[in-house]
Image (cartoon, rainbow, N blue to C red):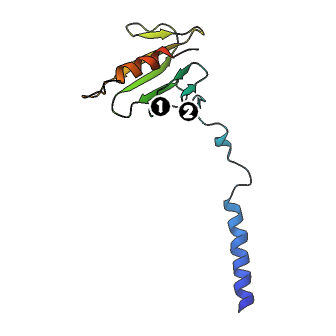
């Protein structure tokens, strides 16, 4: 009886070995979207770098194959969104960088923004560089 249980357990373990890949799946090496490096107070997105205020959240919004699109969300309301653009875009406010790329800046306020939101948002925008 014990020998039968042992053989069954051994066969089950041998069958489960095929469920685990021997190496990482290839899609992990080819994740979509632009690579970015986020540290405590700044982001290096390759195309541009930016400093953000403490306690603000960083949300990467870009779709696979699209340009870089980041949103910085203040803890007490409001956000600053930065989108990478190429070439001239008519009718939009674009911050041009030395490397030839542009960054579209959108600032959204809540109904009751904090008194220091405008200053922090402007500081974030002023820190954008290539």
Q: Residues within 10 Å of mark 2 (few under 14, many from 20)?
A: few
Give the left or right position of residue 129, taking residue 125 as reference: right
Determine which residue is flagged by label 1: 54
In the image shown, does 7 or 59 lie closer to the viewer?
59
Residue 2, by quadrant, is: bottom right
What's the distance in space between the residues labelled 1 and 2, CA to CA?
Answer: 8 Å
In the image shown, does 23 or 61 lie closer to the viewer?
61
Q: Residue at x 72, y 75 (%)?
A: 11
Kindly state the secondary structure of the residue where label 2 is placed. loop
Q: Residue at x 39, y 31 (%)?
A: 74
Determine which residue is flagged by label 2: 40
Relative to 81, is 99 above or below? Answer: above
Q: Residue furthest bottom?
A: 1
**Which circle's residue, 1 or 2, is located before the other in the chain?**
2
**Picture coordinates of residue 39 (x, y %)?**
58, 32
Residue 17, by quadrant, is: bottom right
Q: Residue at x 44, y 16 (%)?
A: 104
Q: Do the residues under discs 1 and 2 have CB atoms within 8 angstroms?
A: yes
Q: Residue furthest front?
A: 115
Give the left or right position of residue 22, taking residue 82 as reference: right
**Picture coordinates of residue 37 (x, y %)?**
60, 30
Kindly state the secondary structure of the residue where label 1 is placed. loop
**In the rendered image, which quarter contains the N terminus?**
bottom right
**Picture coordinates of residue 114 (x, y %)?**
31, 27
Give the left or right position of residue 93, taking residue 5 as reference: left
Q: Residue at x 72, y 87 (%)?
A: 4
**Picture coordinates of residue 88 (x, y %)?**
48, 7
Q: How many marks?
A: 2
Q: Residues within 10 Å of mark 1 (few under 14, many from 20)?
A: few
**Disc on res. 91:** none
Give the left or right position of residue 10, taking residue 60 as reference: right
């Amino acid at each position: 009886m014990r020998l039968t249980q042992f053989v069954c357990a051994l066969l089950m373990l041998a069958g489960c070995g095929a469920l685990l890949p021997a190496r990482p799946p290839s899609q992990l090496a080819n994740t979509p979207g632009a690579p970015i490096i986020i540290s405590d107070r700044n982001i290096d997105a390759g195309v541009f770098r930016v400093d953000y205020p403490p306690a603000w959240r960083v949300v990467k919004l870009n779709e696979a194959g699209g340009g870089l699109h980041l949103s910085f969300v203040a803890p007490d309301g409001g956000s600053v969104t930065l989108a990478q653009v190429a070439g001239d875009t008519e009718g939009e406010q674009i911050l041009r960088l030395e490397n030839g790329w542009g960054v579209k800046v959108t600032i959204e306020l809540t109904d009751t923004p904090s008194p220091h939101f405008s200053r922090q948002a402007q500081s974030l925008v002023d820190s954008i560089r290539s």
